[in-house]
């Protein structure tokens, strides 16, 4: 099923709403403001509703099917989050209102800061960054501000493991750092000998993702943090994979100094086309004075008669604002709803189930799909999707074939240190039946790859569109709608 | 996988053809196969620039990934393959022929010792 664009469906003169005759005198707009070339769509309400309902059904979404897109934590987003975010006390306020009139919103932000601090072991949290990568940038700015405040401005070297998220080197480079890539050892952990070799008085820090992008808990994390600290550097933790570790491990306790959270991954707010992200950053006590301006503080605790009072305060040596107003507040409301819905024990259950589900799928397929670092995985794992007896089959072919089974493909070709990588993250919100069906599909596809590879090369055949020409899409960038030639001209 | 015997190679999958005191640089058949369909090539230096061994001289982007290409040896760039801007697929079609990236005037001939011959390149330990 395909659907025409809304511009092709438009018919001149067609309307959805008939306005009543005006009961005030008409006033013509000045001629210079009138545009003759404004091609607004003309349709009935019925046609508009059908159009958008149809194209919404062409999407794959967490609400329609399994979405094991590694590194993205596409867990189910409880609908109660949407209800709370729409409460008028949160949705009908303005960030410039006097703080006395928005105490509920500020209280929610303060509580969220406290929850994140408790989960991670950090002392202070900002909710401002708009998403994970901006959280990284904020964190690296804080590291730089810390060194500069001590007159130690020669520290410009940032170590980034080859199993880190791709945004880590980018965030460091944008902050003016020099990037040194650190390889993984044979077990998929950071190579501490290589860290040691870079430890000198120009070291700003280390950016480490744990669990790393291989889905493995980095067993060298304590030693790596100690090496960096001993030479005067700081450690940035990429918290994008926190879904594996809630209630199990507190990053601040192993030596991480600053870390971002992805509310949109770990704490169940829609993302990937479904809503903006949110990337709060937690820091140790030593770094709290550098946080972006402002943070929410509890000014007085209150008692039985008087409620607590919250205000916006400026950290003493703040790096400044990183986002207008207070970040993505609506996302924070949704994440807070999730935190208090699950509570301490629920969060621990979520992480342990996420890890169990990933290991379950890994165990079901590992005899057929090569696992380059075969260990117990965390919330996700990476397999090498190629076989000597299936020449010409690549990870991409397997992913395209999975679409025919109604599954969203896993992440392809990441991390780069695994050939033909397929990165699979089931999350905790999937039933055993779904995990079984997915593993069965992968096993069937492996069989087809060896015995009937054309099925894979031609896939998907069971989707609104067949195999797309990705080379053409990447080379011939047509990034805006091209209106039909006779659009809007029938009547003129 | 082709590995012409008259070329020199690096562990990072660049090839070098020595022509007197000049050298022509490209990426290997193995590299293009790993990258799959190449959609974009950017030479990140200009004619007349001098780059050191190991410095980034180009970025090659495929449908899978974007990869930096490093100078196998130091030298001054004397020519850039302009055709790759419009036809990056040349690298997939003929990595050792029309799809060269740069021509340089070598500045440190001792660095040639760092390069691998075809046999050594073929025998590199790969991850799989």
Image: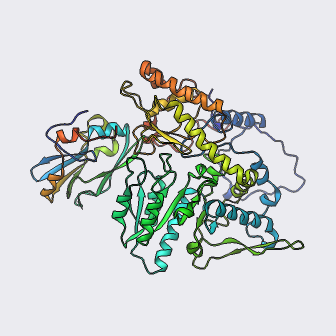
- Residue drawn at 52 percent across, 45 percent down: A479
Does residue A11 appear in this view? no
Where residue B70 sits: x, y (%)? 28, 53
Q: How is the image coloured?
A: rainbow
Q: Does A125 appear above or below B54?
A: below
Q: Does A398 appear above or below A176?
A: above
Q: Residue furthest left?
A: B20
| In the foreground, A484 or A64 | A64
| In the foreground, A124 or A391 | A124
| In the foreground, A480 or A425 | A425
In the rendered image, the quadrant that contains the N terminus of chain B is top left
- Residue drawn at 49 percent across, 79 percent down: A149
Where residue A430 sits: x, y (%)? 65, 37
In the rendered image, the quadrant that contains the C terminus of chain B is top left
Where residue A397 sits: x, y (%)? 46, 30
Does residue A330 appear in this view? yes
- Residue drawn at 42 percent across, 37 percent down: A420
**Image-based side of A273 in relation to A442, left or right:** right
- Residue drawn at 59 percent across, 76 percent down: A289
| In the foreground, A223 or A460 | A223
């Amino acid at each position: 099923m395909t659907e025409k664009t809304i511009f092709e469906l438009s018919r001149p003169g067609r309307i959805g709403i008939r306005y009543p005759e005006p009961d005030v005198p008409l006033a013509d707009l000045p001629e210079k403001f009138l545009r003759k070339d404004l091609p607004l769509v003309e349709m009935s309400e019925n046609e508009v509703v059908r159009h958008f309902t149809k194209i919404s059904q062409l999407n794959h979404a967490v609400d329609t099917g399994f979405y094991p897109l590694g590194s993205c934590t596409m867990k189910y987003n409880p609908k109660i989050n949407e209800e709370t975010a729409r409460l008028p006390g949160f949705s009908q306020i303005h960030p410039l209102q006097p703080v006395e009139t928005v105490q509920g919103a500020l209280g929610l932000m303060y509580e969220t800061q406290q929850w994140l601090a408790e989960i991670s072991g950090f002392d202070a949290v900002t909710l401002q960054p708009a998403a994970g990568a901006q959280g990284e940038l904020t964190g690296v700015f804080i590291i730089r501000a810390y060194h500069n405040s001590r007159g130690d401005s020669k520290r410009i070297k940032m170590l980034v493991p080859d199993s880190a998220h791709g945004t880590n080197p980018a965030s460091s480079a944008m902050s003016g750092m020099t990037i040194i890539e650190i390889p993984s050892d044979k077990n998929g952990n950071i190579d501490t000998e290589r860290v040691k070799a870079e430890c000198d008085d120009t070291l700003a820090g280390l950016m480490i993702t744990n669990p790393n992008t291989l889905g493995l808990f980095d067993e060298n994390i304590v030693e790596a943090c100690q090496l960096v600290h001993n030479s005067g550097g700081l450690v940035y933790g990429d918290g994008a994979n926190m879904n594996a570790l809630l209630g199990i491990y507190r990053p601040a306790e192993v030596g991480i100094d600053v870390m971002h959270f992805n509310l949109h991954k770990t704490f169940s707010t829609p993302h990937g086309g479904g809503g903006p992200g949110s990337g709060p950053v937690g820091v140790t006590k030593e770094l709290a004075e550098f946080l972006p301006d402002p943070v929410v503080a509890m000014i007085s605790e209150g008692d039985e008669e008087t409620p607590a009072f919250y205000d916006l305060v400026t950290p003493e040596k703040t790096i400044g604002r990183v986002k207008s107003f207070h970040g993505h507040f609506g996302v924070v409301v949704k994440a807070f709803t999730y935190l208090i819905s699950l509570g301490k024990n629920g969060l621990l259950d979520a992480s342990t189930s996420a890890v169990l589900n990933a290991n379950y799928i890994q165990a079901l397929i590992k005899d057929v799909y090569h696992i380059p670092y075969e260990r117990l995985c965390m919330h996700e794992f990476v397999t090498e999707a190629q076989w000597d007896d299936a020449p010409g089959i690549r990870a991409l072919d397997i992913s395209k074939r999975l679409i025919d089974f109604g599954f969203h493909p896993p992440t392809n070709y990441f991390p780069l240190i695994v050939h033909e990588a397929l990165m699979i993250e089931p999350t905790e919100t999937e039933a055993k039946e779904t995990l079984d069906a997915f593993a069965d599909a992968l096993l069937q596809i492996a069989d087809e790859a060896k015995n009937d590879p054309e099925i894979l090369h031609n896939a998907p055949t069971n989707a609104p569109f067949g195999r797309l020409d990705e080379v053409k899409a990447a080379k011939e960038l047509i990034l805006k709608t091209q209106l039909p030639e006779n659009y809007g001209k029938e009547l003129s | 996988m082709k590995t012409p015997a008259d070329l020199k190679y690096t562990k990072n999958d660049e090839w070098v053809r020595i022509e007197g005191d000049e050298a022509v640089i490209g990426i290997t058949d193995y590299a293009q196969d790993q990258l799959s369909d190449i959609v974009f090539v950017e030479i990140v230096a200009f004619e007349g620039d001098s780059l050191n061994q190991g410095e980034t001289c180009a970025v090659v982007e495929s449908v899978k990934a974007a990869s930096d290409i490093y100078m196998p040896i130091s030298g001054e760039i004397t020519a850039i393959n302009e055709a790759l801007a419009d036809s990056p697929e040349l690298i997939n079609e003929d990595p050792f022929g029309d799809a060269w990236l740069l021509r340089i005037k070598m500045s440190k001939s001792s660095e040639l010792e760092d390069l691998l011959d075809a046999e050594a390149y073929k025998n590199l330990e790969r991850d799989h």
